[in-house]
Image (cartoon, helix red, strand yellow):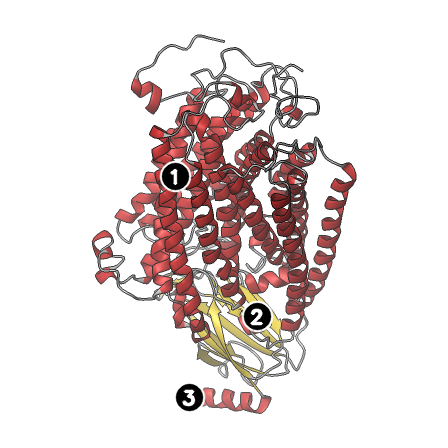
Amino acid sequence: MSEHKRLGFVRKYIFSTDHKIIGIQFLFSSLIFMAFGGLLAMLMRWQLGWPGAALPWMEKVAPAGMPGGVMVPEYYNMLFTMHGSVMIFFGVIPILAGAFGNYLIPLKVGAPDMAFPRLNMLSYWLFPIAAATVLAGFFVEGGAAASGWTAYPPLSGLKETMGPGQTLWAAGVVVLGFSSILGAVNYVATVINHRAPGMSFHRLPISIWALFTTAVLTLLATPVLAAAMILLLLDRSLGTSFFLPAGMIVDGNLLPHAGGQAILWQHLFWFYSHPAVYIMILPAMGFVSDILPTFSRKPIFGYHAIAYSAVAIGAVGFLVWAHHMFQSGMNPTLGTTFMISTMVVAVPTGVKVFSWLGTLWRGSIRLTTPMLHALGFISMFIIGGLTGIFLASTPVDMYFHDTYFVVGHIHYVLFGGSLFGAFAGITFWFPKMFGRRMNEPWGKIHFWLTFLFFNCVMFPMFSLGLGGMPRRIYDYTQYPGLVHFAGLNRMMSMAAFCLMASQLLFAFNFLYSLFRGKKAGENPWEATTLEWETPSPPPHGNFAKTPVVLRGPYEFSVPGRERDWQLQTEED
Amino acid sequence: MLLPEGASTIAPEVDRLFWIILWITGFFFFLVQGCLLLFVLKYHSRGGQKAAYVHGNAMVEVVWTVVPAVILLLLTVASQKVWAQIRSPRPITPGMIQVEVLAEQFAWNVRYPGPDGQFDTSDDITTINQLHLPVGRPALVRIRSKDVIHSFFVPQFRIKQDAVPGLPTQVWLEPTKAGEYELRCAELCGLGHYRMRGYVTTEPEEQFQKWLTETKANE
């Protein structure tokens, strides 16, 4: 192991090449962005709960968007567009792939750092640049992008319908794509080349299988997104017609575009954005697969099935993109193809869920905070997964497409799934990252409040969807047929405010424990993988001497041994 | 809160599939949530019992891969049957009524071909945000857009089809019940998306013909 020289503050904590610091930078940044994205959602819930009601103090924050404190439709459209974009691009993807990918991969494979530490630093620093570009939209004429996070042209592609905020949005997403790709290159290279002696692929923790698959997905899919964004930028700024057909009439003017295809964008966008859903869920599944054995004190049930199902989900995940497009005007026969692939992807997903249940079966379960979040993940993800089957069925999707049913579904996957997975990950690895433990009772209260209020906000969305309420509408009371949902919407809004407020408890616990938490020691959870064999926090270079791996990652309760866990490097 | 009452020949087919999927997913929902709760309660480490040292079971793993796969396959076949029925192009028959819906920010322009059965002739009948259809007669709705993407969504018909500029689309349907329904734009189309609302009236043939004549007279 090479000598690591002492570094000044700036090189150590700001422009650091240490994967652990970069992981923590991603963690802090994405938590801040998620809080911001949550606040945007609160404003939306205000409008949906009490349509047209004034919020006078908001006039100071957004004079154009909320004159007199009353929200205008354009502002509502900006809110859901930025909520989706911030949560997905600057919240969930960076916290799962950026924070945990960076922090965990070298530690768990037994490497001193990532394969390309400088690229890694660049990957982090592109991220705030991308975010600043996208968010700058709020300060330009016409406001931020307002065509949804999916940005379907022609709405997003015309200067006549979307202002410069949309251009900034597309440019920012391209920059973020570079950040993702640089990270992914690193993860793939590190897992392939920098595993410690004895760390065969079949001894890798499932979290690494998941992060590795995610990195491959990112590498293959992100360039397509970048291409789509660049074409959109050209359509917007140079007058090309990639997505813009002939004959469009906006505000009474015939536009000069010709020859473009509006739904080409949808193919390109979803070719990235559907794999992106797996980018946002596979790592969370990986964390849960590490946490469940640890707190069940039992080897994971069906290691190979779980590992290969991650790969299968990743592979088939590339062939399902057009299930977002069943009603888009695409050839219906193509719809059939994508229905089949979508149903297929449910099989490995089911295998994972059943294997987790198998892991709990006959275990000796410790209900710690990370374990509660992991169990919450499974419980919520099941709802997200099962509701996906309705949407996979082409005729049933014809009814549910673009209704609140889809909004409910995506939130069960990305909040109920990814975010509970992220909470599980944070509470589980916090002691390793900062050398201190988070407060358990506060953590448990935070879990239960989040679990309760989350369901109160999101479950009624399925009802709204069944009632045919379209998503992305500023004032549903415009439809007499939807007015009876007023009470339900108000209840959901109140639950949403409580959900947001509950996160203060988490923020407080996080910050307090950072400085005042109990000292953690090397292995506070009595876990088995390599990161628990080095001090908390691990020094620059991670391991005092290169670990030699002797066994699989989840050897708990091995018969005939005094301790109920056996480290991956421990001699028999 | 369940689905609104259907009003087209498609609706019972879609609803049947919906219920089949609800029963199947409902079963798995209770099965998995039940096991989760049961295992957590039963195997909660209170007395410090030791966990079983088990790495898996090939038989069980095959079963829980194959059984869902078979169920999903059957669901796919059932869905495909309905999908083909709804979406496959149909020949234009003499009894079929044709109507064009041209979406724009933020209104639905509705056009009937008039007595000669041809569009773009002087006897075309046009309305805004009012789509009338006779009960019991198959209809072909041609959907287009003038500007951005919109989506033609009539919940009671269980029909949704995007209106895409430069890409004419169409849906076939047959209203089965007289009534007034809302036509909701389901694809974000700009700041007025939320108020892009039309009305669909399904009525007996005579009333429909009367309405057409009156509409033409008022043009």
Quadrant in the rendering for residue A132: top left
> Is A483 situated above or below A125?
below
Q: Position of residue B94 (x, y in %)?
A: 66, 81
Q: Secondary structure at mark 3?
A: helix
- Residue at image location 63% in from the left, 63% down from the top: A395
Q: Which mark is residue B218?
A: 3
Could you tell me the amino acid type at mark 3? Asn
In this rendering, position of residue B168 left or right of residue A138: right
Task: Return the chain for callout 1.
Answer: A
A150 sits to left or right of A189 = left
The answer to whether the residue labelled 1 contacts the one labelled 3, judged by CB atoms less than 8 Å apart, is no
Indicate the amino acid at tag 2.
Answer: Leu
- Kind of residue sitting beneath label 1: Leu
Q: Residue at x 46, y 87 (%)?
A: B215
Q: Position of residue B179 (x, y in %)?
A: 54, 83
Residue placed at 34% from the left, 34% from the top?
A: A512
Which residue sits furthest front? Answer: B47
Number of residues whose C-alpha sits closer than 10 Å to that of mark 2, classed few (under 14), some (14–19) or many (20 or more): some
Residue B3: give its label.
2
Mark 3 on the same chain as mark 2: yes
- Does any portion of residue A276 appear in the rendered image? no
**In x, y percent, where is residue B49?**
64, 34
Helix, strand or loop under label 2: loop
